[in-house]
Amino acid sequence: MDWLNLISTGCKHATVIAIAIMTVEVSASTAGTLKFRGDAYDLSTGKFVYSENHSEFYKEGKHAYSRVSYRDAAGKEFASKIITFLPNRTQPTYELRDVRDGYVEGIRREAGGTVYYARRKADEPMKEKRIQTPAPAVFDGGFDYFVRENFNEICAGTNKSFFFAVPIELDYFRFRVARQESGDVCRMNLELDNVLLRQIVRPIKLWYETKTGRLKKYEGISNINGPDGKSLKVRVVFTYPEK
């Protein structure tokens, strides 16, 4: 894989941080389960391609873990992910599995360290590597908490950079979040933190509701592949339960 494909792969898997877990505000006294959904549409045709069905589980008012079920147009689950947010919500451990081809990626902690692991297909061996990600480090759905912790600054126009884990490459890449416009909706781009590479790799576009801090819409390359094995380019629209 050449350097450009490697960076593109990093950008593809960064979509996980944008669409995997977008958390609804829950009061500290809340316990139980919260569910919401994201519907993904092909950017070119507008056709529905899959849904993300999120279930968040809370313990003593804190987001303990989530399960995400990816389902096709017929409602059949083809991939799933478990994300554990305690004790570090910006660096959760997680595992994503796609039953169609046996794709697996994840991060676990053992002996005080962090291990990235992944395989592309069921007939390939699992590869893994112990990695110390530089600060500020963000893993998978921890991106949403990174945005929340820096939301006011980002929406005021301050760019925020971080190192994002990419287990499929057993590596990490430096990204940034940059505001594009503000108002009732704060629109921001998730992009590589390199001025030259930003001219080559398109950003991921995110629309957050300013009042609630919730992600409303996402546009860009997906971490989910189509029937041809290539990454889908999608628009994901999120719906949340009424408070």
Image (tube, rainbow, N blue to C red):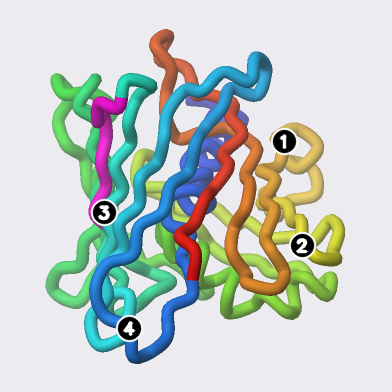
Give me the disc on residue 30.
4
Magenta stretch: give its range. Answer: 75-82
* Helix, strand or loop: magenta stretch: strand
Q: Residue furthest front?
A: 242
Element type where label 2 sits in the image? strand
The answer to whether the residues at label 3 and label 2 have Cβ atoms under 8 Å apart is no
The answer to whether one can see residue 129 in this image is no
The residue nearer to you, when weighing 202 against 27, is 27
Residue 58 x/y as whole percent: 27, 75
Residue picked out by circle 2: 186
Give me the disc on residue 153.
none
Quarter occupied by residue 3: top right
- The residue carrying pointer 1 sits among few (fewer than 14), some (14 to 19) or many (20 or more) residues within 10 Å by Cα, namely some
Is tag 3's residue or tag 2's residue first in the polypeptide sequence?
3
Element type where label 4 sits in the image? loop
Residue picked out by circle 3: 67
Residue at 45% from the left image edge and 60% from the top image edge: 241
Q: Is residue 211 left or right of residue 196?
A: left
Where 15 falls versus 159 (above or below)?
A: above
